[in-house]
Image (cartoon, rainbow, N blue to C red):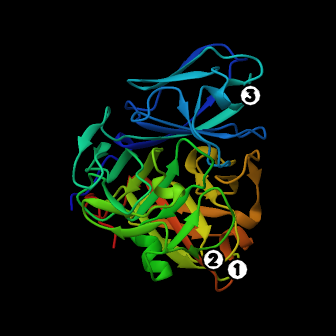
Amino acid sequence: MAQINKPNQYFNTIIYTGNNNQSQTISGVGFQPDWIWIKNSDNTEWHHLMDAVRGDNKFLHTNTTGAESTGNRGNGHNALAFTSDGFSITNATQEDGDLNFGSRLYPTWCWKANGSPSSNTDGTITSSVSVNTDAGFSIVTWTGTGANATVGHGLGVVPKIIIVKNRNVVTNWIVGGSLIEDVGGSTNNYLLLNETAGMDSATTLYASYNTDTIGVKADANINGSGNGMLAYCFAEKKGFSKFGSYVGNGSTDGTFVFTGMKPAFVMAKKSSGTSNWVMSDIARSDVPNANVNDQVLYSNLSNSEESSVGLSIDLVSNGFKIRGNGGDRNTSGATYIYMAFAENPLVGTNGIPATAR
């Protein structure tokens, strides 16, 4: 497995400022993103997710179960389009605080896949896939059949995390993958990205996780008949990404999690019980250039950013250290799953990036 030495070629976090609902171009990402996730951190507003496979200006929202919309919440406003170094916002109006309200801050998490999709026939259903095997990330769409099937994901290895959403109807965001299977003990186990519920089990969702395909069943949440389906698939890459679990100890001297790189972004969820999905990143620290970060957002909530000592986390050169004892981060004896993406790989004394273990 190749070591990624420049993580910011594949993932970056930026923060832009709304300009009173006029058109603007957001730059500084460092590459043309293929998936962007935007949240107004100053106000109670929806999360907005757009990707290159579904196309410009097609939004989904992790804090709701709603279907895909064109423009902001389906009103046609706030059209977004990808550019070579970020994205542009046009057709903004005063009512659209979700994406471009004056003087509001908008954290934006950006991933690089491989641009426009290609047809993939590895599964029993033909899928459209934009895949970056170097970064272990693919965006997959297909038309659901309402029956057991397999869908090609393009990664060439078993995905650690898979996030699926039905684009056309009201459904949950279904989180599966080999990490969820390992923690829960079965391919029937899953989490909901839009809910606080702990890990559950169902025989109607995921069937298998393979090097080339995802096995899906008949449920509308995962393979709705005639519906447009979407999956974000992640495989672990040394120096760039880590997907795993840890056990909380309920202390401000919390668990240390080795990732083999300095995380730029960490999202974690208690799998053994109820909690929010906590999102932390280096760009939103309230102490510039400090490791400690207590500024959090939640994928399942539209809430504005919170500063919570109970959810503090240190993002350090080789992983992250839990500093808060809040239940969303560190209940004693509880199991948490996480996904982390790098700012920098861990560098050894010889100046050569080390590898995650």
Kind of residue at badge 1: Ser
Front-most of 314 and 337?
337
Tell me whether the residue at label 1 lies in contact with that at label 3, contact meaning CB atoms closer than 8 angstroms: no
Q: Residue at x 72, y 16 (%)?
A: 93
- Of badges 1 and 3, nearer the viewer stands 3
Front-most of 103 and 164?
164
Q: Residue at x 32, y 33 (%)?
A: 115
Tell me whether the residue at label 2 lies in contact with that at label 1, contact meaning CB atoms closer than 8 angstroms: yes
Q: Quadrant of residue 221?
A: bottom right
Q: Residue at x 57, y 55 (%)?
A: 173
Tell me whether the residue at label 2 lies in contact with that at label 3, contact meaning CB atoms closer than 8 angstroms: no
- Of badges 2 and 3, nearer the viewer stands 3
Residue 126 versus residue 211 in the image, above or below: above
The residue to which callout 3 is attached is: 97
Instruction: State whether residue 314 appears in this view.
Output: yes
Front-most of 288 and 218?
218
The residue to which callout 2 is attached is: 254
> Looking at the image, is mark 2 or mark 3 earlier in the sequence?
3
Q: Position of residue 324 (x, y in %)?
A: 70, 70
Kind of residue at badge 2: Gly
Q: Position of residue 144 (x, y in %)?
A: 42, 49
